[in-house]
Image: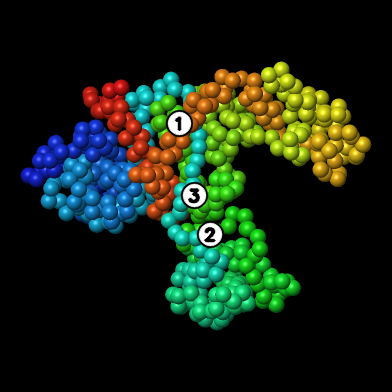
Amino acid sequence: MQGVERGDRELLDAEALVGHLVPAGSMFAFLAGHRRNLFPDGEFEDLFPSGKGRPSIPASVMASILVLQTLHDLSDRETAEAARCDLRWKVATGMALDDKGFDPSTLVYWRKRLATSGRPHRINDAVRTVVEETGILRGRRKRAVDSTILADAVATQDTITQLISAIRRVDRQVPGAAEQIAKVCTGHDYSRPDKPRIDWDDPAARDALVSALVNDANALVAALADTELEGDAEFALALLALVAGQDAEPAEGSDGTDGRWRIARKVAPDRVVSTVDPDARHTRKSPENRRDGYRAHVAAEPETGIVTDEKVTTAAGTENSDPAVAEEFLDAEDGKRAWYGDSAYGTGDLRGGIDDAGHEAVIKPKPLRAPVEGDFTVDDFTVDDFTVDDFTVDEQAGTVTCPNDITRPISRTRVATFGALCRACSLRAQCTTSKTGRKIVLHPRDDLLRQARRDWADKPELRESYRTFRPNVERVISQIASRGGRRLKLRYLGTGKNNAWLKRRTAALNLRNLIGRGLTHTAGAWTLAT
């Protein structure tokens, strides 16, 4: 049953007795006065379609608690304790001083109800409605995009731990798996919670254990291959097959048929790093900085810091890259925008999407790399009256001309091959180290990439605009990814739950931003003092 807030105050109402102790202009004071306007009960009625049972916590109260929890980065237990013991929380949520609060599992219950509803992000939607009504973004046509890596909620597992964990998961979730494990798995006692007892300093002992675990995994997958599975059971078996294949390779001198395996001397693409959270991934923000977790993508209006869109994705895969998600943000916007981004967003695909939609790209071009350091690149343009005579592309003629004035046609796959013509070229040492000569591969939107590099060189006002507005999104990213000077670590498993967390997080930060500008609700409308 849907719970509703009482119209009258209780005898020990916290706001009436100690509300004056809560600083004006704080999130607590704002929710105390406006939570019912922000999160009206009618917006949450569909979560409780039955009129039977004990009334739930009122939607305006629980939505406020979820906002405060995400803003302050608290666990469910810490949140329940704050609602029971912290006067500010009691004032913000309309509780009485002697209210004993709720069990932490109530938060899980509400998040699950929201996740399975037709509008899982309605808290974020409510704040977006406030942003729209205030008009803070009216006439502001700039959007800055950026991303950050958020650490996952589990420890990265090594290959041995993943294999054992995956087999145990099959045991728990696949009907009949226990009998098959007892029958075909002989490399380890999977009922034991501790790690295998071997001499971990002995490479031969480790290799023997890896072989035994991989053979057990393969045997179990084969034994259950014809079993009709669905849901969690099907996923558990597929995960076991994936883990067994991603990190293992035949031992030296073996083709795998003799049962000898070793940990692969390579990095598997899109590698699962933990069977506890299969969506978590390895990634790199730089060649030296490898991290595990998820990628949080954000679009924000740079002058106000208001987040206009957000998304959590796995940290690997081209479909989860910065420019790919930025294209999704682009499609969600109405009207012409100027899009600001660093060189990670300077791809031909994103520039093409921006150009096709009639928007403007204020994106730092990706640096060109020459096969021979310091010499000829694929470009030619003029900087301060100095002409860089590298490769010239004529799209109308369908040709590419090299620095030695040799012209070659562009193929249907957009490749210009100079090949044998490079053998006698006097400029070869400055152009290529390839024995077969230079080959130029052109992106379908190469014209936009070349124009972007020319504009960046020739238009100082473009670089100045970039330096003025693009860095502002880094402050937004910092607010999302940290609190009190420490980097946040995600508390949930899976892309879906962490994406819901990010949307609550940006909603809370947007709301705090608006409160700082004097947000209030008068005469049925949301307005700002500044």
Kind of residue at disc 3: Tyr
Q: In the drawing, what numbered circle is on residue 185? A: none
**Dot 1 corresponds to which residue?**
472
> Which of 178 and 256 lies nearest the eye of the viewer?
256
Determine whether 216 is above or below 506 in the image: below
Q: Position of residue 35 (x, y in %)?
A: 24, 37
Residue at 62%, 67% in the rendered image: 263
> Which of 225 and 355 lies nearest the eye of the viewer?
355
> Which of 95 and 300 lies nearest the eye of the viewer?
300
| Colour theme | rainbow
Q: Quadrant of residue 447?
A: top right
Secondary structure state at the residue bearing disc 2: loop
Disc 1 and disc 3: Cα gap in Å? 22 Å
Q: Earlier in the sequence, mark 2 or mark 3?
A: 2
Q: In the drawing, what numbered circle is on residue 294? A: 3
Disc 1 and disc 2: Cα gap in Å? 33 Å
Kind of residue at disc 1: Asn
Q: In the drawing, what numbered circle is on residue 273? A: 2
Determine whether 5 is above or below 236 in the image: above
